[in-house]
């Protein structure tokens, strides 16, 4: 779950990035509308945390641009301007949610998860497929009677695959979910995390499609395509 934070307060933005990573998100941050536009043009994000008051304009202007071109990117407005009319203006402009400063990081993470869930058309907080279920709030899962715990990156890969069972995701697409701009991509990191997931889930759950990438098996006992 990769999100973009647009916030010009460096201390707050750093805290947001660290806190969201601990909650399982991959978070990138920029400080201006210009940088936000460039980031959105070059990177696929699943959510946007957008401050209203920015050095080069209003976050509402960026929100209006997104909605005018038909973008359904979930947007959470973050601002110290917490009057009712400000909230109404932001929501009417197309925001999916609104959180006033100061705020609790756990609440912010929960609101982001709810936004992303609604964007995917899901009512349930978790994902389930062929006896495997996962909970984004706790980075845990269950298969049959077995309780499972995952690292942040293991969970990111599994979550991406479970969003669309049977759909092939390339290594590059999965790396996009795992790493922010400031993080160095480790060699064979996707392969390593898939190997760890198979050790926890069983080898038949995640298939390798040679030359293309990985997918979640659509049959409960489907064999792996390759090691």
Image: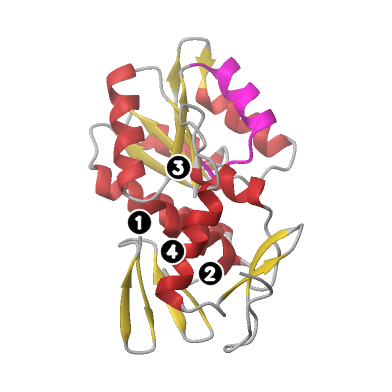
Q: Which residue is mark 4?
A: 196
* Residue matched to label 3: 26
Q: Nearer the viewer, residue 106 or 128?
A: 128
> Would residue 12 appear left or right of 166 to someone viewing this image?
left
Mark 1 and mark 4: Cα distance apart in space: 10 Å
Task: Decide: is 67 above or below 140.
Answer: above
Q: Nearer the viewer, mark 2 or mark 3?
A: 3
Label 4, label 3: how many angstroms apart (C-alpha)? 20 Å
- Residue at the location (32% across, 50% down)? 23
Q: Residues within 10 Å of mark 3 (few under 14, many from 20)?
A: many
Q: Is residue 30 above or below residue 91?
A: above
Q: Residue 220 at x, y = what percent?
A: 57, 88
Q: Earlier in the sequence, mark 2 or mark 4?
A: 2
* Of marks 1 and 3, the one in the foreground: 1
Give the extent of the magenta segment. 32-48
**Picture disc at residue 122:** 2
Sequence-wise, the earlier of marks 1 and 2 is: 2
Residue mark closest to the camera, 1 vs 4: 4
Q: Which mark is residue 151?
A: 1
Is residue 127 part of the magenta span, yes or no?
Answer: no
Q: Earlier in the sequence, mark 2 or mark 3?
A: 3
Answer with mark 4 or mark 3, whichever residue precedes in sequence: 3
Characterize the local packing of mark 4: few (<14), some (14-19) or many (20 or more) Cα atoms within 10 angstroms: some
Dividing the picture into quadrants, the one containing residue 67 is: top right
Q: CA distance from mark 1 to mark 3?
A: 13 Å
Label 2 and label 3: CA atoms lie apart by 21 Å
């Amino acid at each position: 779950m990769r999100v973009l934070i647009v916030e010009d307060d460096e201390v707050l933005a750093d805290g947001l990035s660290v806190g969201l990573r601990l909650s399982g998100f991959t978070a990138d941050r920029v400080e201006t509308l210009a940088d936000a536009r460039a980031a959105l043009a070059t990177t696929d994000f699943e959510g946007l945390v957008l401050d209203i008051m920015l050095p080069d304009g209003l976050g509402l202007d960026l929100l209006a641009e997104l909605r005018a071109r038909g973008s359904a990117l979930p947007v959470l407005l973050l601002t110290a301007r917490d009057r009712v009319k400000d909230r109404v203006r932001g929501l009417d402009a197309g925001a999916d949610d609104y959180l006033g400063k100061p705020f609790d990081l756990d609440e912010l993470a929960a609101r982001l998860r709810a936004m992303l869930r609604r964007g995917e058309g899901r009512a349930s907080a978790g994902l389930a497929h062929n006896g495997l279920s996962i909970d984004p709030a706790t980075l845990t899962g269950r298969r049959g009677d077995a309780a499972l715990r995952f690292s942040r990156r293991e969970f990111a890969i599994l979550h991406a695959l479970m969003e669309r069972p049977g759909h092939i995701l390339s290594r590059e697409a999965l790396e996009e979910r795992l790493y922010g701009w400031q993080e160095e991509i480790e060699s064979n990191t996707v392969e390593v995390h898939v190997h760890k997931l198979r050790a926890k889930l069983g080898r038949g759950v995640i298939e390798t499609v040679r030359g293309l990438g990985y997918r979640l098996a659509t049959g409960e006992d489907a064999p792996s395509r390759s090691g």
